Amino acid sequence: MLGFAAVRPLLLAALLAAGCTAPATGSSGEDPPGDSTAVPDGGPADAGGEPEPGDAFLDGFFPIAADYQPHGDFDKWKRRGVNTVVRVPGADSIGDWTRKANELGLEMIREPRSEPKEDRDEANLLAWHWRDEPELHGVPASELADFRRRMHDVDPDRPIIVNFWGGGMLQADGDGCYAGHCYPDYVEHADWLSDDIYPCNKFACDVELVGEMVSLLRHWGDHQPTFAYVETGDFDGNGSGPSPRRFAAEVWSAVIHGARGIFYFSARVKVPCDSGCLLSYDMTPDDVAAEMVEVNDRLSRLAPILQRGINPDQVSMDGPGAFEIGWRHDPDTQAFYFLVLNPEDAHRDGVSLALHGVHPAGAVKVVDEGREVSVVEGNDLVDDFAPYELHIYKIPAAD
């Protein structure tokens, strides 16, 4: 693999050329709306694509998933706030795995049964999962096209999701090709997309990479919903897993850039390895697991807002170049929610955040923090940020 210092400028140049910059360049404690079933203005969104204006993707449900976990561990993951499970481990059975997920009310993303028609009535099966990291394993896009065609003959309304290797995405050329395989070719035959990149394990804990890969996939895609894997610990045992605050920052970086769900990768594996690579299904440290509970609770409460249109163009916010900023609109209240992340290991005090297209009449509420910030001359918010801290500002519609 190319060194990260060599790859990062190429990636940023590609994102800039594609118009895929980070969404920023920049006492109430009021909670966001909690009705995850309300979908105003036209009913539920199409599960295969991005929502129409006024709708919410997946009716406002935000998948928070544990990846590749045996069904005997589902209770633990549900206690951590997970609402979805992804991929059946080889040592498990689809039948047992599916029954346990249904028993606990967990949504599923998994491989089809050997007889796919048996999945037609699985109400909790969000999508069928194709191969993991096909470009890394040399599987051509034509096989995905064939799989999608066969599965859609069985159930044309159930999406097909494919997951890509973030390392290959980093090394892709200007046409989006890595090792002879081109991401746009895969994307053409997928309904949903996801990628895995683990910055604390492999890239000096540059948490922004998680969001940047989401933006890159969204650029290669054509309105396909995009999901992001997030590392929960030191998966390869090299001593470089994320701290709780960096873990949380990876999640919010993905969300700010438009992720429609989060998949947690928690397996411990041997690296390098040719066979028998799995050492443990869950290497999540206790402190990260505790932070996960808090993050998942917040994601669940914000879900009806997060699944609205990504960064609607009638408003925007500018901040310091390193900051990541995204926004959503709540058509029920006409309020805007601005998500602002400090992705660096440094305190930033007196940060100026310039609002455009919306002009608060008074102080602005900071969601979940029981405080407000004032609007200063020039329509700016000014706030302080701890390392890797997220603030969410709720700005009501003008009277």
Image: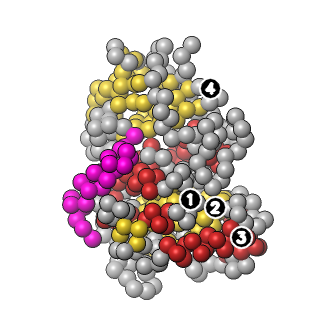
- Between disc 3 and disc 1, whose residue precedes? 3
Residue 354 image position (x, y, % from top left): 36, 25
Magenta-span inclusion, residue 370: no
In the picture of the structure, the residue carrying the numbered disc 2 is 159
Residue type, mark 4 in image: Thr
Residue under label 3, please give it: 153
Question: Which secondary structure is most common in the magenta stretch?
Answer: helix
What is the count of numbered marks? 4
Tell me, yes or no, whether the two marked residues, 4 and 1, touch with CB atoms within 8 Å: no
Q: Which stretch is magenta?
A: 1-23
Q: Is residue 237 placed above or below 379 in the rendered structure?
A: below
**Residue 69 visible, this angle:** no
**Quadrant of image for the N terminus:** bottom left
Which residue lies at the image location 48% right of the left edge and 46% below the top edge? 258
**Can you give x and y, in whole percent of width and height, for residue 5 in the image?**
21, 59
Which residue carries the number 1 mark?
A: 192
Marks 4 and 3, the one that precedes in the sequence? 3
Front tag of 4 and 1: 1
What amino acid is found at the position of numbered circle 2 in the picture? Pro
Which mark is first along the chain, 2 or 1? 2
Foreground of the two, 203 or 212: 212
Q: Amino acid at mark 1?
A: Trp
Label 1: few (<14), some or many (≥20) within 10 Å?
many
Tell me the mark number nearer the camera, choosing from 4 and 3. Answer: 3
